[in-house]
Image (cartoon, grey):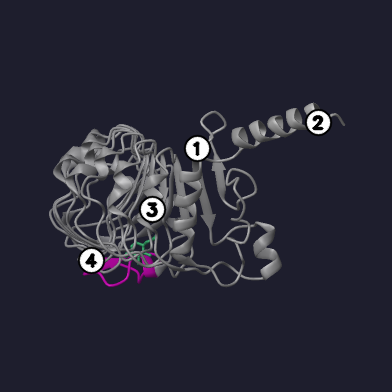
Amino acid sequence: MKPVFTIMSALLLAVIATVNSCPPSDRAALLAFKAALHEPYLGIFDSWTGTDCCHNWYGVSCDTESHRVADINLRGESEDPIFERAHRTGYMTGFISPEICKLTRLSSITIADWKGITGEIPKCISTLSFLRILDFVGNKISGEIPYDIGKLNRLTVLNIADNQISGRIPASLTSLSSLMHLDLRNNKISGPIPRRFGQLGMLSRALLSGNQISGPIPGSISRIYRLADLDLSMNKISGSIPASLGKMAVLATLNLDSNKISGTIPPTLLTSSIGNLNLSRNGLAGKIPDVFGPRSYFTVIDLSYNKFSGSIPRTLTVASYIGHLDVSYNHLCGRIPAGAPFDHLEASSFSHNHCLCGKPLRAC
Ligand SMILES: *[C@@H]1O[C@H](CO)[C@@H](O)[C@H](O)[C@H]1NC(C)=O
């Protein structure tokens, strides 16, 4: 080959290499991120060598135009061959280095189900203005949710469930105007649900169960038009159930069980779109509203362990479907209605009341 061609092809190769490879600063940030973690069983970081972090670095991908790192996707439980070969799920210790914040074009960070990652969520995460997905589920991350998380106006998924996050839900969280999926389950979060929670206009799932959240259910929640799944169970929530929850267009699951909720059941709650209702283990009292009808369709109504009195609503017998009904451990009295929705229910659904009688309990 003539020398001029050699030089030209060398130049061409150099150009291709720069086009394909990530900027040295992104590579340096990734290596600093890797240095703070320890993954002893699978070798997921073994591929993080060489200059081009945009190719063949396990769990890393870059934007095709900017060539900046756009996604970090590291799951400790997946069907990737790397797990099959090791015959085990992932385990990783260490912490999430703030160096990750130098990857300023990140659009998704998933560091999920590694069980052993400790430390805090880097405060600087709220400067990653391109972030759409933040998923740290299933680690041992402690500390608080960054107070200015609300700056992430593109964020659609915030999942930090199954960690040891403490402190309050920051007020700024309510300005995450793109947020669709919020999962804070099973942490140590305390304090109230921010009063302006209802500002989260795009939210479809709000899962806050298994924390120490106190105070009332903000009425503003009922303004969230797309909300389909609201789980506030196993907290310390008090006050009454806002009647407006029964006016929500697509709310299908409402879990308020194991809290300190008092007052009565708003009748609208039982005529709404809700098909999965758990109010078990609260301080609810009064009569169960007799408002069911042919359009009532419930997979679950669990009202057990409350202080309901009066009788079992007669209209329940005309409901189109009642999959599972539990009214045990209340102060109910009178004849259990007979009819199709009741035929399959067992005695345990009605036990421990004042003076209920009839099938499947003793005859009246
Ligand atoms: C309702 O919540 C209670 C208490 O948290 C729980 O024990 C029960 O299994 C739930 N009911 C259903 C039908 O899931």
Query: Under tag 4, what secondary structure?
Result: loop
Residue placed under numbered mark 4 in the picture:
330
Residue extent of the magenta highlight: 348-364
- Give how far across and how far down residue 32 sits, in percent: 45, 57
Q: Are marks 1 and 3 in contact (CB under 8 Å)?
A: no
Residue placed under numbered mark 2 in the picture:
3
Residue beneath the point at 69% across and 64% down: 84
Amino acid under disc 4: Asn
Query: Under tag 1, what secondary structure?
Result: loop
The quarter of the image holding the C terminus is bottom left
Badge 2 or badge 3: first in the primary sequence? 2
Using a 10 Å C-alpha cutoff, classify the residue at mark 2 as few (fewer than 14 neighbours), some (14 to 19) or many (20 or more).
few
**Ligand 1 visible in quadrant:** bottom left
Q: How many angstroms separate mark 4 from mark 1 (CA)?
A: 60 Å
Using a 10 Å C-alpha cutoff, classify the residue at mark 4 as few (fewer than 14 neighbours), some (14 to 19) or many (20 or more).
many
Q: How many angstroms separate mark 1 from mark 3 (CA)?
A: 15 Å
Residue beneath the point at 69% across and 31% down: 11
Residue 361 in the magenta stretch? The answer is: yes
Badge 4 or badge 1: first in the primary sequence? 1
Q: Are marks 4 and 2 in contact (CB under 8 Å)?
A: no
Amino acid under disc 2: Pro
Label disc, if present, on residue 68 of the rendered structure: 1
Residue placed under numbered mark 3 in the picture:
99
> Is residue 188 visible to us here?
yes
Query: Under tag 2, what secondary structure?
Result: helix
Badge 3 or badge 4: first in the primary sequence? 3
In the rendered structure, the answer to whether residue 83 lies left or right of residue 178 reads right
- Give how far across and how far down residue 185 sits, in percent: 34, 58
Q: Nearer the viewer, mark 3 or mark 4?
A: 3
Using a 10 Å C-alpha cutoff, classify the residue at mark 1 as few (fewer than 14 neighbours), some (14 to 19) or many (20 or more).
many
Q: How many angstroms separate mark 3 from mark 4 (CA)?
A: 55 Å
